[in-house]
Amino acid sequence: MLPRSWPSQFFKSLLGTVLTGLCLSVYSQDTPLATGAGTVYPGIIETFEKIIQIDSAKLQNARTLLTKNGKVFSAADTVTALDLDPVFLNSLILHSDPGYLKLASMDKCRFYEALLTDLLKSSEGKVKNVIVTYLASGKRETAVMSKKDFLDKVVSRECPQTQKMISLFQIKTLGAVLKDTNFELPTGAQQCSNIHLEWLNNPKTPFLCQIYEYGKDARSRVGDPKEQAQKSAVAKILESKQTPVQRDYLETLCTHLDDERSFCEEFLNVSFWSKVSSGVKEKVYVEDICRQLTGGTVPSAATLETCLARIRKENDLCLFPRGTNSALSPQPECDRLSLALNHSSLRSNYQDCPGDSDQLAATNLTRIIANFTMADLKPTKGPCSAISAGEFFNFNKTYDNEENWTLEACYTDKISQREICTKTFFGEYGILPESYTLVVAEILKKTRGADPTTTCEMVDSTEYNPLLLRYKSGCFIIYQKDQCYLSECKHKILYNDRTVDLIKIKNRMSIHYFPLNVRDERFSQHYMLTHDFKKKGTLLNNLTSINRYFKKNKTGLIHGIGCAEDLLPTFFKSQGINHCQPLPFIIDGVIYSEGKTAFVTRTAVDSLQAPRILMWTHIFSGVKTYQRLHPLKIWTMYGLD
Amino acid sequence: MAWISLFLLMVSVRAADLPMFLTKHSNDTLRFITMDGRYAYVQKKPGVLGLVSSFRSVDFLTDSGQSDFLVKGSRFEERLLIESIPNVHTEYNLLKNHKIHVVDWGNTVTKEVGTGKASRLHLEDEWVTYFNPLERSIFIQNLETQKKYAIKLGAKSNPFFVPEVEMINQNTVVYTDTNEAGFSAIISYNLLEGKSSVLYKSPGSGTKIELCQHKTYLAMGEFPHDGVSRGSKIMHVTLSKGSSNLAGFEALYSSNLGDLGNLICRETGIYFIKNLTNAKTAVSKKMEVSWIDLRTRKVEVRSAMDSVSQLVEMNGRVLVPLRGDFYVVEGKFNIGTDILKSLPVDSKEELPLDL
């Protein structure tokens, strides 16, 4: 059988090696490709077949001769210049999968590991014995060596890490090893290339591919039926240790080790919706889209599957999602959205309702913070945008900047006749004491003698029913969902069924995203991200610097502010000269198309699950125009890593 | 595909690099300038709008917040609208309401008319309309009688939607809206009767409708939003004095590519931003200023800038804002030179400002 990739460049170079090996072989009885005077050349295929036949015969002859002569390798200490026999090596090259040959060619240890894990095959199939050559007493000898001896006497000495890997990849420890292994999903071409190279150099790769091959072998049911039963049982155990995502990943990796392009295409060109369907990506990306099929209710697993099938065919289905997550719409069509999501790396496994945000800086910065911390977001109650308000407040509190938080809940203390104000945000985020629910409860305790255990609950006005008994006692903040934002929220407070009007909201959320003056620079959010949060900020003002940044930072994030009229001209129309609505944005991916560079961008008004593909010209124009209008005329686009 | 080819044959190219707009003022601070450059409204500092004329400068309007200003006129040159946008650099909010002031052309006494955005003057500048995104209502106000009307928009599919509004006569307002499924429509509203009727409904979702008006006609353009593959079209209807009959929109132009729009109506034609990319689904799009002649319906490309994204009109001058600069499509581009000129013969041209 011919190697499956014989036309490839890699195979051509291997062929050169093989031909050289065969021609120069000391064991050659005749010139392998020598042809007699009247020989017809029917084609290259026949020549390969000849090479393989010759190789097979040679290996068999060599092994028979060595066994007959009792040439079994025993003492490694007394020999020098130990090497694999060229005939044996040629056989491996001719009969192994080119992907595994590529892996074996990375370095000596990867070669040994590929041999030990049965990834490399000779003309006899799986390698049981190794043929080595060495110098003993100044004379070159050839001998057969068992694979176990080869591991103990050669591999352990030359590659100590291999022994460690073997002990790690045992049935008992496999689960933990797979858990610790980073099956990183690429989101960009450059990042994918780096990931592919990392896998080739990773000592775990031969062992991981051994698992994949074992499963494949067991499924093919080729060979002795008695062995098959045992094989299937082991394969079942191995399979149980892997998640479906890991299984798919290993298949892609092990079948494309020699072909980086195909490896990357599998990840970047496969529809994003297939990834959701297979569980590689979360359901949150399609839930709101699929609510269109259920009339707005949460779709069941079966509905999601039907919906995913429709998404692949109906491009318009993604335009107007339903549900509570309000954002700029229409979203991009399904094809375009899939392309953008395939190249995106921003954490997007939650919803933050940018359509309900009247402080888009908080929305954008929370997205950045959540992405870098990767910590679990705390449970929220009340308006959907509370997640942005709470996480953003927490960030500022952590770095001692809550002093500049301007939104407050105030009441007049009757004893001291003073107005007392507490910093707050609308909603409830974990147990942050500045949550409006907790602030109101505290005020009620101080002013109305409420029980120390009193808590308040935010209730959507559409769900509130005054006739229900549950609303007759306790504290409820009834808010109007369509008029509840980060800085203002239309609501009324009910305590034991009576309206409380002693609490007044003062000020709005005021944020210095980038420095607005030199004196207050250290209070700007960008300063905190780069100095306190310890993210390195790189100024990016041309395509070259951005491309360089993405090459260096596989999952890099760029944040900035530009004019909405330039960034999204189909949505925001300029009303006059120098009309600019500053709009924060995040870029988390790059797409090269038709010789132009486009960026996967989420402006702060876009849904986290629906990035857009924006051209560099629009982004540059947006930031440049904003720079002209900025009080310090500073450039407002930075890479963070 | 034959009709597309025919259409392409009708598009003639007169593309050129547009000249940069040159004035005596810094581009960053300029908010409005008259056609001859004699009167300019400039943002002097946050919260202060200045008027500069004849080497004199006055603080025209001051605001307590760190406001930015937006100044708009109309072809009637009777009044100016000034939107005061609070806390531009600290409150990143696209749903923010602006304070809307009105000032008589040539006067310095401003009057606050309401809060909202996307304000426009209509009908000899006697009427003003603006949109309040928090209340999702269009307000229509007569500046002479102070009579005020409000139209509440329907269900929101896009929280950031801003309607386009035109007034046909004292009783008829035409505006755009979208339904929950994302279909756009043009609605005619009778102020006296308080009744509305749909003039046009988009055949597909994901598009935006723009309106513009000149003396004798009302034009509408339908263009797809970003990320939506749809065609574009421009139609118009002739207006007869006193009549509110808007039936019979006539097609002027159509393309199977997604144009950007930004209609600006002129007496003999309409400016818009046209997509000159060959592929329908291309990520990168070449957008240029184009002109469609109302009589011949011939389309001319008027710029060669590759990525025009906005088109604005200011006192008869048509400009392309790009990367903080402005390029002139129509009107004199260099008004930055000092040449001693005699007073205009037509006194109307000179603003009798009371400085």
Image (cartoon, grey):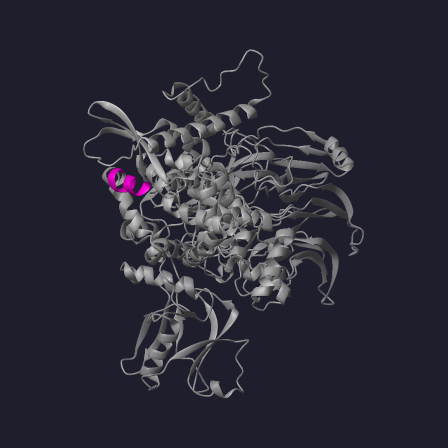
- Occupied quadrant, residue B9: top right
Q: Is residue A149 magenta?
A: yes
Total numbered badges shown on the rendered structure:
0
- The residue nearer to you, when weighing A17 against A379, is A17
Q: Is residue A613 left or right of residue B150?
A: left
**In the orientation shown, which residue stands out farthest toward the top?**
A37
| Above or below: residue A91 compared with residue A473 | above
- Image quadrant where residue A199 sits: top left
- Residue B352: give x, y in percent of width and height: 56, 45
Tell me, yes or no, if residue B153 can be seen here.
no
Left or right side of B195 for A207: left
At horizontal 40% and vertical 69% (from top left) the residue drawn is: A379
User: Where residue B198 sits: x, y (%)?
Assistant: 74, 60
Q: Viewer-proximal residue, A309 or B99?
A: A309
Q: Is residue B268 above or below residue A274?
A: above
Q: Is residue A289 visible?
A: yes
> Is A439 placed left or right of A153 in the picture?
right
Q: Residue at x 31, y 82 (%)?
A: A446
What is the x, y in percent for residue B234?
72, 45
| Range of magenta residues | A147-154
Q: Main secondary structure of the magenta part?
A: helix
Residue B196, magenta (yes or no): no
> In the image, residue A231 lies at what x, y percent?
45, 53
